[in-house]
Amino acid sequence: MAFLQQQDLFPIDGQTWTGPTRTMAGYARFLSPTLDVQYGEKMRGIYVAVTGDVSFVALDGSTVTLIGLVAGVIHPIWSLQINSALTTATGIMVAS
């Protein structure tokens, strides 16, 4: 379960206003997925340790392959499962 922190932020552009607070939340947990098996929940980030391609199942059920995901970055990608076919990146972690 993620804990939400609310913080008062002022808009960068003084002519716009998005509201008195914005919710700031990070990733609650990471797990190492088993390839070709659904996580059982929606994950909202993918981390790769070694640069490569990642094939995953998106929230709408479609299969997507991203080419050359950069290593060492949490990519804000919502997914249900990582596929072994067409995935060349290693050290994959998913975050919720």
Image: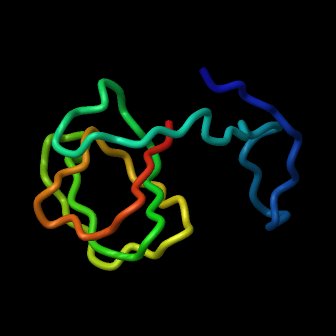
In the rendering, at what x and y percent does residue 5 appear?
A: 79, 31
Depth order, front residue of 2/84? 84
> How many labels sit on residues?
0
Depth order, front residue of 14/60? 60
In the rendering, at what x and y percent does residue 41 appear?
A: 35, 26
In screen coordinates, is 71 left or right of 1? left
- Where's the N terminus, which quadrant? top right
Q: Residue at x 48, y 60 (%)?
A: 75
Q: Residue at x 61, y 33 (%)?
A: 28
In the rendering, at what x and y percent does residue 24 appear?
A: 73, 40
Quarter of the image where one finds residue 51: bottom left
In screen coordinates, is 46 left or right of 26? left
Depth order, front residue of 89/18? 89
Depth order, front residue of 7/29? 29
Q: Residue furthest top?
A: 1
Quarter of the image where one finds residue 32: top left
Quarter of the image where one finds residue 61: top left
Q: Residue at x 21, y 64 (%)?
A: 87
In the rendering, at what x and y percent does residue 84 appear?
A: 16, 55
In screen coordinates, is 78 left or right of 75? left
* Colour logic: rainbow
Compared with 74, 6 (above or below) is above
